[in-house]
Amino acid sequence: MSDRIHTLSGYLHEYQKSVAQPEEFWARIADSFHWRKRWDKVLKWNFDGPDVKWFLNGKLNITENIFERYLFTIGDRPAIIWEANDPNEAGRTLTYRELYHEVCRFANALKSKGIGKGDKVIIYMPMVPEAAIAMLACARIGAVHSVVFAGFSSNALADRVNDCEAKAILTSDGNFRGAKKIDVKSVVDQALEKSSVETVIVYQRTNQEVTMVEGRDYWWHDVVANESSESPAEEMDSEDMLFILYTSGSTGKPKGVVHTTGGYMVYSKYSFENVFQYSPGDVYWCTADIGWITGHSYIVYGPLLAGATTLMFEGVPTFPDCGRFWAVVEKYKVNQFYTAPTAIRALQAYGTTEIEKYDLSSLKVLGSVGEPINEEAWHWYHTHIGKNKCPIVDTWWQTETGGIMVSPIAGITPTKPAYATLPLPGVQLCIVDPEGNELTGNSVEGNLCIKFPWPSMIRTTYGDHDRCKQTYFSTYKGMYFTGDGVKRDHDGYYRILGRVDDVINVSGHRMGTAEVENAINEHPKVIESAVVGYPHDVKGQGIYAYVICDLTNRTEDNLINEIKEMVSKIIGPIAKPDKIQIVPGLPKTRSGKIMRRILRKVAENSLDNMGDTSTLLDPDVVNKIIEGRQ
Ligand code: WTA
């Protein structure tokens, strides 16, 4: 593990090298992987296209860097430890060798269904090892996976299936989530009513009754039954697509963020090993869902590329009670624990009795991801979970960045509550003012950009390269714009302040305001709507919707409930507005633009400083909105 950072001066030294000679730096890291053919050139890029390529003409398969690499040395080490939703159900452990054979069997099954290199495969599955097996089997044969969070509705699933023209869907009969049993297959059936999907493979998890369509639907256990447990890996180019992951932006429908093979592989392993300071034999647990980028990079690819033992948890933090996370930590002697501030805040509310029941002494590192962690939650996590001895790595990154960009190196970078601290090697941050001028020096605040490529960065948005250019590379010329606000303090430490665009972050889930508005507007009685985020004690941000409705023959209450149901149906329960206010009008300028600034102030209840409202078409509407505030 020569690429491991061990000291603060080592970090500073590596960082400097990565900026002074990025190509030499990344070539050295990439050389520790197995390439069937080494690259001809490390990097070719411009941010105008954008056109970014890493390890050009390198040939490889990412799964060879997990399996062929480790089978003969650590084949018997646990790769995945799985804990079921119900604590009374036995868990499962798959060693590297067992995982390898499962992946091969399923890879062969996919091939026998005519799926091959370049085909798109949607994975809509619960948190079971087969979800990871599905991802790796796709990678083994060169198919492109697109995992869709199993909490999304059939409409949202259909949008993704159609956008990437998926050839197959891998799913389950149902899903256990806390005390609930959730239909999954029927959601898939609905989503597929108008699609070109040829094959559906169904993993049996809940044993509930499902409809199987002849010639299209197959049981997972049947398709793998007679397959060989060896499957040669397809040779991929560094820049061949590895996966597409849909995420929300400021405008329109979610877009498919495209990640490619070589760069993503190098960066996910490098960042995993360094940030978490994983040592052989450790048990690492990330509580994310594989439907999000965190699950991709830090449950599946990063840890497995590093030969780590990664724990996968099917359930929720509060089932059967709010001590579940700590019970799991004790049971498996978890060493690195990585979760989201929203979970920390939710558990904080229950006090410490449930924590004191468990032995958490195995913990060495705590991680946070997905949204800004407030100081209070940071201290609570540090004191009650980490017992004041575990460094907290507050990791800032995005679906688009593929891996962690700003974070302490555990136990090495001095931490500061609520600060993501310093960039990882290879990450060249830049703070700009609204005009795009770089703000140099310390004690500055502005918009966060990145001015040099890193290996796991977004290459395009699937099927619409111009959208990628417009969204990330056009706001500030020559730079990748993150959409986040940031402060660099007097020590040069970075604190992420949250989104500066129309993306809201609800419990660490990204939601576009336009996306929620479109769903609300589907209700026949809705005339117009505007959605903003507001501070929420547990979720970080809540969704506040202002809606103009036709109230003829209807009460406000039942309309509000119907609108919530509508959003749940169109996107999924995670997008359901927390508050809906029926309003007589929206604050619009004379040119017809909604002044969201005002709506945010009302939602936040900061009514004393509404700013200049003189350009509004009807300033009185603001008073009416304030009066009806929820
Ligand atoms: C936010 C999740 C503050 C940020 C990996 C970013 C954070 C968006 C942090 C990406 C953090 C993520 N501190 N904010 N440590 N981590 N964010 O694509 O606003 O689901 O732009 O990726 O989450 O969310 P995404």
Image (tube, rainbow, N blue to C red):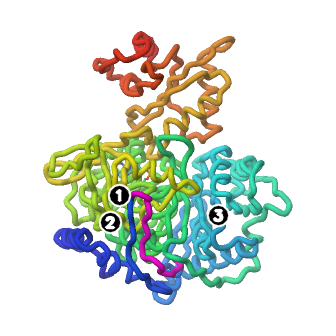
| Residue 101 showing in the rendered view | yes
Q: Residue at x 45, y 55 (%)?
A: 399
Q: Residue at x 50, y 89 (%)?
A: 72
Q: Residue at x 59, y 76 (%)?
A: 140
Q: Are marks 1 and 2 in contact (CB under 8 Å)?
A: yes
Q: Which mark is residue 120?
A: 3
Hey, which residue is sitting farthest bottom in the picture? 72
Q: Residue at x 50, y 40 (%)?
A: 251
2 vs 3, front mark: 3
1 vs 3, front mark: 3
Quote the CA–CA distance across marks 1 and 3: 32 Å
Give the structural element (helix, strand or loop) at label 2. Answer: helix
Q: Which residue is mark 1?
A: 367
Residue 138 percent coordinates (x, y)? 61, 70
Q: Which residue is mark 2?
A: 275
> Which of the pair 220/40 is nearer the observer?
40
Give the structural element (helix, strand or loop) at label 3. Answer: strand
Residue 335 percent coordinates (x, y)? 37, 66
Instruction: Left or right? Give the position of 45 relative to 581.
Output: left
Residue type, mark 1 in image: Gly
Q: Are marks 1 and 3 in contact (CB under 8 Å)?
A: no
> Which of the pair 5/39 is nearer the observer?
39
| Residue 353 showing in the rendered view | no
- The residue range painted magenta reads 48-61
Residue type, mark 2 in image: Val
Give the structural element (helix, strand or loop) at label 1. Answer: strand
Residue type, mark 3 in image: Lys
1 vs 2, front mark: 2
> Which of the pair 58/377 is nearer the observer?
58
Assign the N terminus to one quadrant of the image. Answer: bottom left
